[in-house]
């Protein structure tokens, strides 16, 4: 079995918008005296991936680098007039190339990089910088997205915040009367404490007087009846 450590990307090269099949490329390469299509995989304009030369066979796509590489070729790479190199990849082709590279990497763990034909020859092929585009394709995502599920503690806070507030039935006079002595104790000056205790006593007396007044009024009402 061949030792594969690199993927090399090519273009057909054919004019933008023209469909070319594996059979056509196979004929071109046989006309050059080769035994058949030199690429291992061909990506059509609609994003479908088609088998070329078997992976266990040395390709014929990049001189000096065929023995240890897999050759990919997308259909296109030239402008409509066939005068200038052009990145004519469709969205479907771009997605298919990335998926194919990752699939090959999963089978050939020795693959270390993805290159373009132009990195090894005085050509524009594949009409874009494949080395730069795929240089980070095997690296794990350095900034993974946070999990969509909220931690239990956060969910509890949200749930509590959604609950309606309970109606308060606190006797504010009695509460204030009890708090004032506590506030007074917070001061180190004994004179302040005495004043605060006195205020608390006044409030407490007021509460007791109010209760006594209510009872007195209730007794008067009973006598009238």
Image (cartoon, rainbow, N blue to C red):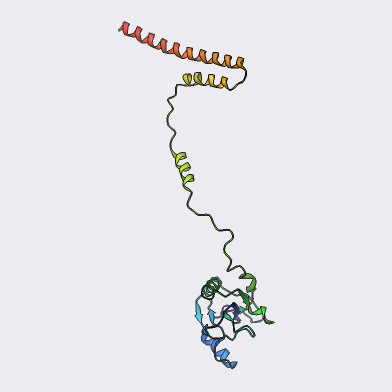
Nearer the observer, 110 or 118? 110
Q: Nearer the viewer, residue 202 or 71?
A: 202
**Residue 29 on image: x %, y %:** 57, 89
Q: Measured from the top left, where is residue 135 in percent x and y? A: 62, 70
Q: Residue at x 52, y 16 (%)?
A: 200
| Viewer can see residue 124 | no
Numbered-mark total: 0
In the picture as drawn, the residue positioned furthest to the right comes out as 122
Q: Residue at x 46, y 47 (%)?
A: 152
Q: Is residue 122 above or below residue 151?
A: below
Viewport quadrant of the C terminus = top left
> Quadrant location of residue 122?
bottom right
In the orientation shown, which residue stands out farthest toward the left?
225
Question: In percent of the image, x 51 and y 87: which residue is there?
Answer: 23
Residue 37 in view of the camera:
yes
Quadrant assignment, res 124: bottom right
The x and y percentages for residue 93 are 54, 74
Q: Please tell me which residue lies in front, 168 or 193.
A: 193
- What's the residue at 59%, 60% (across, down)? 142
Q: Is residue 139 left or right of residue 174?
A: right
Judge whether 212 appears above or below 64 on screen: above
| Whole-percent x, y for residue 186 in the image | 58, 22
In the image, residue 119 above or below residue 171: below
């Amino acid at each position: 079995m061949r030792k594969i450590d690199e993927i090399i990307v090519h273009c057909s090269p054919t004019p933008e918008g023209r469909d070319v099949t594996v059979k056509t490329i196979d004929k071109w390469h046989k006309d050059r005296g080769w035994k058949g299509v030199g690429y291992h995989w061909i990506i059509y304009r609609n994003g479908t991936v088609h088998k070329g030369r078997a992976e266990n066979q040395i390709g014929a796509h990049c001189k000096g680098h065929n023995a240890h590489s897999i050759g990919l070729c997308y259909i296109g790479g030239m402008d409509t007039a066939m005068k200038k190199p052009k990145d004519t990849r469709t969205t479907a082709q771009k997605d298919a190339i990335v998926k194919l590279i990752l699939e090959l990497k999963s089978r050939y763990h020795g693959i270390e990089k993805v290159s373009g034909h132009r990195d090894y020859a005085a050509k524009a092929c594949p009409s874009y910088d494949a080395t730069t585009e795929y240089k980070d394709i095997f690296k794990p995502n350095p900034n993974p997205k946070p999990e969509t599920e909220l931690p239990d503690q956060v969910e509890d806070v949200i749930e509590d915040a959604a609950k309606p507030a309970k109606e308060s039935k606190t006797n504010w006079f009695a509460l204030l009367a009890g708090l004032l002595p506590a506030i007074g104790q917070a001061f180190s000056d004994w004179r302040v404490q005495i004043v605060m205790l006195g205020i608390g006593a006044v409030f407490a007396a007021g509460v007791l007087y109010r209760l006594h007044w209510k009872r007195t009024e209730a007794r008067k009402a009973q006598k009238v009846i």
